[in-house]
Image (spheres, rainbow, N blue to C red):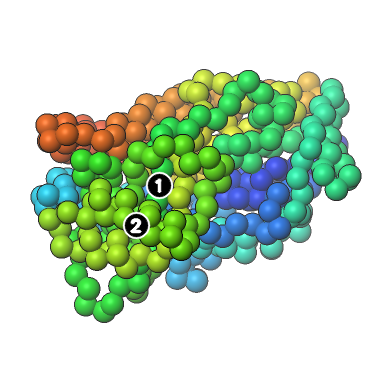
């Protein structure tokens, strides 16, 4: 018979989508008599509900369903269901389609899900709603971590207000500029600006405004890629995001462009995409309210994810350029890790520290992340400026690539990592 000691105390650094879903997963998959006590530390005064619109693929929605978040999304009518992603050349031709409907038109996997385009803010609000219902989770905002000290028995963080907190495990879910990584787990592994920036905003469209896509579209030009997508069920607003080469803008978190800077960004986007033969593109750029600039950083492909008592998850461990499944990969990280930790508890905490659980997680996860890194390289290549010949080759390669990789993408969309064998 397994005899549990007192419940684990877990500190999570980062109150964004990665940290919050990690807390939910650790709660859901813990043995019923060993639910951990979790403290989440967020550096901002409140969780940031700004951001662009992400595409949650079927596997991502399946994880949110397991965590109780998908019901909130449906109840609040967040996001827009996506049957397919259409791909266009801005000269006017439709190049390809990436389908989420599945063989019977109901979605992919069991249970079936399609995709959902949703703002980061709405996704975070849904997760926060579920967090509020958990008695074992406390979210503390306005807390900046100054130092991390790990011993054989515990981990202690010291905050800038002079307080210090001790736990059994520290989870670094604090993003690409992770304090957990840079101060403790792998200080030499620095983030690198990719040279690519996402300039994005939202365009309120009048009733009857005609677009060239059903729900969402990738639009290729010689000087970048533009995403245009509805993100609300009433189809009253279009997300406009331009991935393009931009010199280092010197920002860690991105910023909202206002006044003259916003108009400068808009003018740059119009120079790159405004001559599109697709009639709605220029008006959408002109109607977009302000612009946010979000520089895309990445980490090296290989690196250290853990110590004996600290684990990095999400962008803190493996930030990469967006490759269509980035958010879903983070959700799967949290679930697989939580299952590995639960197994360690069920085995009676062998070794006294969770390194066995950490090692099992890394064995399961690192091959998938390596594949995702390779996929992300194609994104950077597609954003690079190209002449007429290079662009023509790109428009030939893209549909071939989507056709060639369809089976592997569908396998990812079908996957339910709550059923994956842990192997230990």
- Residue 193 lies, with reference to residue 330, above or below; the image says above
Mark 2 lies on a secondary structure that is helix
- Residue at 61% x, 36% y is 177
Which quadrant: the N terminus? Answer: top right
The circle on residue 198 is: 1
Label 1 crowd bin: few (<14), some (14–19), many (20+), radius 10 Å? many
Q: Nearer the viewer, residue 386 or 27?
A: 386
Residue 138 drawn at (x, y percent): 76, 55
Q: Residue shown at 37%/26% (left/top)?
A: 374
Closer to us: mark 1 or mark 2?
2
Mark toward the start of the polypeptide (1 vs 2): 1
Q: Is residue 84 visible?
A: no
Residue located farthest toward the front when viewing the structure as drawn:
260
Question: Along the horizontal axis of the image, is 256 left or right of 152?
Answer: left
Quadrant of the frame with the C terminus: top right
**In the image, residue 281 above or below residue 194:** below
**Circle 1 SS class:** strand
How far across and down, in percent of the image, does residue 209 sit? 22, 73
- Residue 47 makes an appearance in the image: yes
To which residue does mark 2 refer? 266
């Amino acid at each position: 018979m397994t005899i549990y000691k007192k419940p684990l105390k877990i500190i999570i650094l980062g109150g964004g989508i990665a940290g919050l879903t990690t807390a939910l997963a650790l709660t859901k998959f813990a043995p019923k008599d060993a639910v951990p006590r979790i403290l989440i530390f967020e550096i901002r005064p409140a969780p940031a509900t700004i951001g662009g619109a992400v595409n949650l693929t079927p596997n991502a929605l399946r994880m949110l369903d397991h965590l109780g978040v998908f019901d909130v999304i449906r109840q609040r009518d967040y996001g827009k269901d996506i049957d397919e992603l259409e791909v266009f050349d801005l000269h006017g031709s439709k190049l390809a389609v990436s389908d989420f409907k599945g063989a019977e038109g109901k979605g992919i996997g069991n249970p079936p899900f399609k995709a959902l385009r949703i703002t980061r803010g709405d996704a975070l609000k849904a997760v926060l709603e579920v967090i509020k219902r958990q008695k074992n989770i406390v979210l503390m905002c306005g807390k900046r971590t100054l130092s991390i000290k790990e011993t054989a028995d515990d981990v202690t963080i010291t905050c800038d207000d002079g307080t210090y907190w001790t736990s059994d495990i520290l989870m670094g879910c604090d993003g690409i500029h992770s304090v957990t990584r840079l101060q403790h787990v792998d200080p030499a592994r620095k983030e690198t600006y990719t040279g690519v920036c996402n300039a994005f905003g939202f365009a309120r469209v009048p009733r009857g405004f005609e677009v060239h896509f059903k729900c969402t579209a990738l639009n290729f030009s010689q000087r970048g890629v533009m995403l245009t997508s509805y993100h609300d069920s009433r189809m009253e607003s279009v997300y406009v995001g331009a991935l393009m080469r931009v010199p280092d803008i010197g920002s860690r978190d991105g910023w909202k462009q206002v006044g003259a800077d916003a108009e400068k960004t808009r003018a740059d986007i119009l120079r790159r995409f405004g001559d599109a033969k697709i009639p709605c593109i220029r008006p959408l750029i002109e109607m977009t309210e302000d612009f946010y600039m979000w520089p895309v950083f990445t980490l090296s492909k290989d690196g250290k994810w853990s110590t004996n008592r600290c684990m990095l998850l999400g962008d803190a461990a493996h930030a990469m350029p967006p490759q269509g499944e980035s958010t879903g990969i983070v959700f799967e990280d949290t679930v697989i890790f939580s299952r590995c930790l639960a197994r360690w508890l069920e085995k009676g905490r062998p070794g006294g520290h969770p390194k066995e659980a950490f090692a099992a997680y890394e064995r399961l996860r690192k091959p998938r992340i390596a594949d995702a890194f390779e996929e992300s390289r194609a994104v950077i290549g597609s954003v690079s400026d190209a002449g007429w010949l290079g662009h023509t080759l790109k428009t030939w390669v893209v549909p071939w690539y989507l056709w060639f990789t369809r089976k592997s993408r569908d396998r990812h969309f079908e996957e339910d990592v709550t059923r994956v064998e842990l192997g230990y």
